Image (cartoon, rainbow, N blue to C red):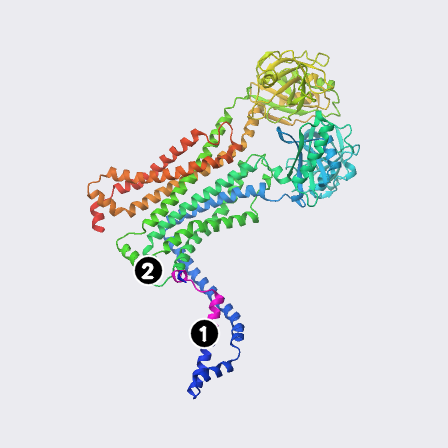
Amino acid sequence: MRWRRALRVERAPKRQALEDVEAEISFHLDERTAELVASGVAPDEARRRAEHEFGDVGAAADSLVPPARRAERARRVSRWGDEIRRDGREAIRSLVKNPVFTLVAVATLAISIGANTGIFSVANAVMFRSLPYADVDRIVAVNETELGSIPRNPISSATYIDWRNEAESFTDLGAYSFPIAVGTTDTDGRPRQVKAMSMTPSAFSILGVTPVLGRLFAPEEGVSGAPRLAVLSWGFWQGRYGGDEGVIGTTVTFDGRDHEVIGVMGPRFRFPDGTVEVWTSLRFAASSEGQNRGAHQWYGLGRLAPGVTPEGAKAELDAISARLEREYPQQMSGWRSRVMPLQADITRTVRPLMWVLLAVVVAVLLVACANLANLMLARFAARSREMAVRSALGAGRARLVRRGLVETAVIAAIGGGLGVLLGVGLTRLFVALAPADIPLLDETGIDTTVLVFAIAVTVASTALFGLVPALRASRVDPAGALAEGRRGSAGGRGQSRLRSGILVSQVALSSLLLIGAGLLVRSLIALQSVDYGYETSDLLLVSINLPSTAYPTLDDHNAFYDPLLERLAAIPGVAAVGSTSEPPVVGYQMTFGYQLESRPRPGPDPYYDAVDVRYVTPGYFDALRQSLVAGRLPNRADRPDAAPVFAINETLARLRWPGEDPIGERLRLDDDSEWAEIVGVVADTRHRSAEEALPAIYAPFAQKEWDWLTWQSLVLRTEVDPASLRGPIEEAIWSLDASLPIERFVTVDELYADGRARSRFAMQLLVAFAAVAVLLGAIGLYGVLAYAVGQRRQEIGVRMALGAGRPSIASMIVRDGVRLCLAGVGIGVASAVVVTRLLESLLYGVGARDPLTFAAIPLILLCVGVAASWLPARRAARTDPATVLRDG
């Protein structure tokens, strides 16, 4: 075949072996035929006798071909091994002779592979590695969703019981609570907060896990009235009990309630994350009769029955919810189910970030490979005479391609090895920089999957930056190349176009990365300048939770908080103090449907959609410096024996009384509540990070209706360093109750900074990677133009000899560079219009097609392009025409 002849590719071992065997048999037959003819036998008869004596030629060939094929393969493998070792030694010697090229190539590859390895190790732990649970693909998260409003919401007790009793799509259905801080006493007698979570026995069985010590909850221990039990985490067991196996059967007290310790989980068990220290038994009634349908507070966990999909399970739960909606329209109107694989549910909020970072490091790798491809093209072009000599001496194209690939493989092997080592360090750096709320982050590490990925990336990189230059270099015309070599030229127009095309792709990818980085920078600036509706600086948050066993009634709550707030206000450096049931950023959001006395919602359900309800003490608004818009604020006169009152925010006032005065209107939260008068309207606050203000009600804490609402967060406006107040604040709290632990001691500014952590993390990495890509692009542009100047040296000399000035020569080279930049920037901007939509979930206050960013980044890149073009242009302008014409 023509392509075989062009490449000088050998036949396949099987075909070669068959031809060799056939030739050997033919040789023996010819020899015997010649002997018989020499003895006087006629040629035709001699041939017949020879074939008869030899026997079955086909059978002989069939028996001889397999060993011949094995021998041929062994010969080729040995020869190829010798040739590759020889090529490898030559490649190493060649690279050692060019240390600058080698250092640049290896460093470029190591940085890009290290970045890919580091980011993939994080993404692998968060998204790709299976959770350590039995048959995890069948485990699903089961929650509720309010149509058109809340995409993921906890389940009410009654709905969970009905789903559990009626659904047939699950082999088991369990429930668990949100992790909360509960109070206990440490071994030294001091109060301590422990992160605890309640779980049904079925939730543990669905996960398919076993404890390292003791046992887990039995099915009969998940019903109302069963004893209170606890399973300890490995860390809590080691820290609190020193790994004492005698802990099983002992009693531990959480929030004033005794729990029997029945088990200890292993060090790798984390559910739902690594912060939980204790799992307590969650108990439900057998029937939903009389259970609360309005309070949504449990998360569901299910194991799908064989053959059932998440979509099928959702359809069945929705059918049950539709029936419940007909029976309980007030509580169940619009509520449906949400069924999602557990791993997807756990990582739902961080997946966009992980995919963006993976896409970014792949783009950096492509830029690096493009840069290396241009370097290899220049290197092979400079060695075109060597290639021509090899070809003239009989080396086929395949041999020349392999020679080039061996050299790139040596670079890739060194760069890949260093990249993996760098990836180990970058992995640790990424984990240290990453926000603490990224799930499964503590599982990050370099494992077999990551190593296989790193090897695959190295191999792919070798193909990307080595194959095209090697193929291009192998297309050599010995006579023409040797003639050009005598004139000192290397390469040609084809290579120049290829190098320019690769450079344009580099600039395009760099543009894409830089635009993404610019959007995130703009977003973070917007986040840092958000007006939250109150003064966040010098605002301290201290959270505590009164155990219901020690403080069972509203009178008990008031008897504790009233003197506590007075003592805190008397501390030097405290300008104002109050408390709230829902602190900024981290508060447990309580939402209720509400009814307006003067304008009930039309239809059978008089209640409007959910509204935030925050129970506050009188000093709360002074501490936040939240403005009063109309009326008055709840004050000390609003006690349990006074008429109930509410303050509302501007959003609720605009929503329900547009253009009217809501002061004096009355509303209530449920049928058993008294009508409360609206006495004031306060300014909106962005309570949940930077999201828009939601409708909210502020109710006096002293008038709250539910004894179970025991948690409050103290907010203190300070005039001194907040950290210096920790001792006096703890003393004030413990002077009233020495057993009460403090859950949180943090400034509001720190909380908002934590809320911006993911955007900041993405911005830091994207800016760093974009800077690397732009640097590589600038180096690539310099290399292309410097190479072009070398190629056009004679042309430049002729131009200057004919009168072209140095400035015109320099501007010609710069124009070439700018044209390449413009082409790359144009492609990059067009791509960014589509690709930057991936960043939308990470952006705030700036669109994915922000005009300022899309205008500024091309200008920056053009400036970089001009700067990178200046040195080759300067070199071209210094060309001596006399020398060039004499040497040409």
Q: Is residue 9 magenta?
A: yes
Instruction: Give the SS element for disc 1.
Output: helix
In front: 22, or 555? Answer: 22
Q: Please state the horizontal and vertical placement of residue 406, each as a whole percent of the image.
A: 43, 56
* Residue that appears at 27% across and 42% down: 876
Instruction: Give the SS element for disc 2.
Output: helix
Residue that mark 1 sits on: 23
* Residue that appears at 65% across and 42% down: 268
Q: Please state the horizontal and vertical placement of residue 516, each as a whole percent of the image.
A: 46, 35
Q: Amino acid at mark 1?
A: Ala
Residue 389 disc label: 2
Q: Is 819 on the left-hand or right-hand side of 64?
A: left
Start and end of the magenta stretch?
Answer: 3-21
Sequence-first tag of 2 and 1: 1
Residue 34, compared with residue 109, is above or below; it is below
In front: 244, or 422? Answer: 422
Residue 739 in view in this figure? no
